[in-house]
Image (tube, rainbow, N blue to C red):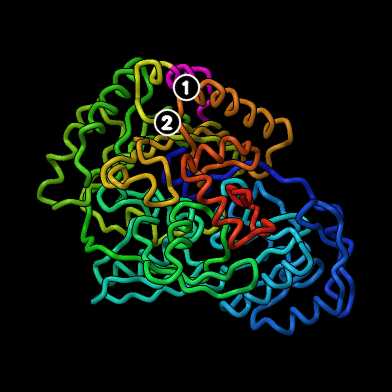
Amino acid sequence: MKRRAFVAAGLAALASASFTHRRAFGATAGADLGAVGLDGAALILKGKDIDDLRAALRGELIAPGQAGYDQARRLWNPAFDRHPALIARCLGAADVRSAVSFAAAYGILTAVRGGGHSFGGQSGCDGGLVIDLSPLRAVEIDPLARRARVGGGALLANLDREAQGFGLATPAGVVADTGVGGLTLGGGIGRLGRRYGLSCDNLVGAEVITADGGWRRVSAEDNPELLWGLKGGAGNFGVVTEFIFGLHEVGPLYGGTLSFPVDATARQLLRNYADFMAGAPDELYAGLDVSADDHGQRLIELDVSYCGPVRDAERAVAPLRRLGKAHEDSLGVASYVKLQGSDDAPGAAHHGMYLKGGLVRDVTAGFIDTVVGCLESARLDTFDLGLQPIGGAIGRVRPADTAFWNRAANYSMHVLGYWKTDADHDTVERNKVGAGASWQRLEPLTHGRYVNIASGDDHDSHLAAAYGDNYQRLAALKKQYDPRNLFRLNANIKPA
């Protein structure tokens, strides 16, 4: 399956267990409701308190049995089948304050949903409260100041299309139906990143509701330490209702898909790719994926974008074309919106997935041998291995300047197994085991984690590796703004 079709269709992991009380309660006014606390213990939410929260919201408060519940609880990837006790669909910061205050008062398990695109399924929860920001998708562009104000529930497609109306963009992922919030809070690797940095490097301000229900303006002047923590510290410090980004002039790009068959030359092709990317200009992004297309053909596929002057593009990408005999070459001048897929953001995936990933510094001969060994043993019709190049401007930021620590990495790598939504249990387990076996071989060759591809079963030590020497500073910040760890369904930082 091609990367564009595949990633736009979905990229997540791990089906969840069902909440045992999910059908026990309806939305009857005044009725008590079963729920799950932060510690996993059962709670009873008083009907009067639920009614008071519902009355306080401009948006909806949706409970099991109520019209629209199944649609509202649906996450981006159908592998996740979460059944929250309550879903607060927030229309503004005041709604978020009410929902956070309710969650804190009860100590209820709380998930924050922006785009619903969490790889670990943490945009939802079983038996808890989901603070749903998906109605907050407004994007406002100031073309003179080159600033974008972006709602906490906006998708990349919303930001890309509005900013490109003024010939502007900010680095923001590679798949249009990704949520801006989750992407940015975890770092944000994208096709403009090697030139302009991570998404979080371009974050200049925010508005945040913290665990005490307080509203905080965040900028270099207001709460600067909290701004630092938002730049890669995941969703640990509060609910971001608005992001403010710096923008860059981005006109037509040169890019598209360049793919090659997986054959006896794969090892040399990977070597030549890595050697070229080590000295590639900052303007060039060439993400690599290995999987099978719709006809079962095994392919090494490059997702190419060149954001420098179009007149220089052919020369810049020429070494990629010389990697081998191309199966497909669709490279050409294209708009940023087209390359991002922002005209066609499906919003929901067609496959469930099990994903693992880490950061890679050096593509050594041993690394390539291990990758090729994984490809030779995997069923590529149900398996994907990818590398996203980092480096460039991303690597020139000092690790301590943002919460995103791993600036020395040159690639973010993922491996995943995927399955159709109607697959039986044995198929799901077989594909998860296959991906897990490949990851066991590759993990020792990684250095650190990228929290945006952290999975729900990652150990605390793995998450600490994502934050590196910044962890203690982040833990102190967590203690200041969320001492009870209300916001824990993320790449979690424990309060100091």
Q: Which label is found at residue 332? A: none
The spot of residue 367 in percent (x, y) is 40, 20
Q: Is residue 177 visible?
A: no
Task: Name the magenta segment's main secondary structure.
Answer: helix
Sequence-first disc among 2 and 1? 2
- Identify which residue, 230 or 274, lies in the foreground: 230
Q: Which type of secondary structure does the marked residue at label 1 adopt?
A: helix
- Which amino acid type corresponds to the residue marked 1 in the rendered image? Leu
Bin the neighbour count of mark 2 within 10 Å (Cα to Cα): few under 14, some 14-19, many 20 and up.
many
Q: In the shown orientation, is residue 283 left or right of residue 38? A: left
**Residue 138 vs residue 334: left or right?**
right
Asked whether the residues under the numbered discs 2 and 1 touch, taking CB atoms below 8 Å apart as contact, a structural biologist would say yes
Q: Which residues are magenta?
A: 370-381
Q: Mark number for residue 290?
A: 2
Residue for point 31% across, 49% down: 193
Residue at 74% across / 80% down in the picture?
54
Q: Nearer the viewer, residue 442 or 103?
A: 103
Q: Is residue 83 in view? A: yes
For the point 20% across and 33% down, the residue is 279
The kind of residue tagged 2 is Val
Q: Residue under circle 1?
A: 375
Q: Position of residue 84 (x, y in %)?
A: 75, 60
Q: For the point 23% across and 30% down, which residue is it?
A: 276
Q: Residues within 10 Å of mark 1 (few under 14, many from 20)?
A: many
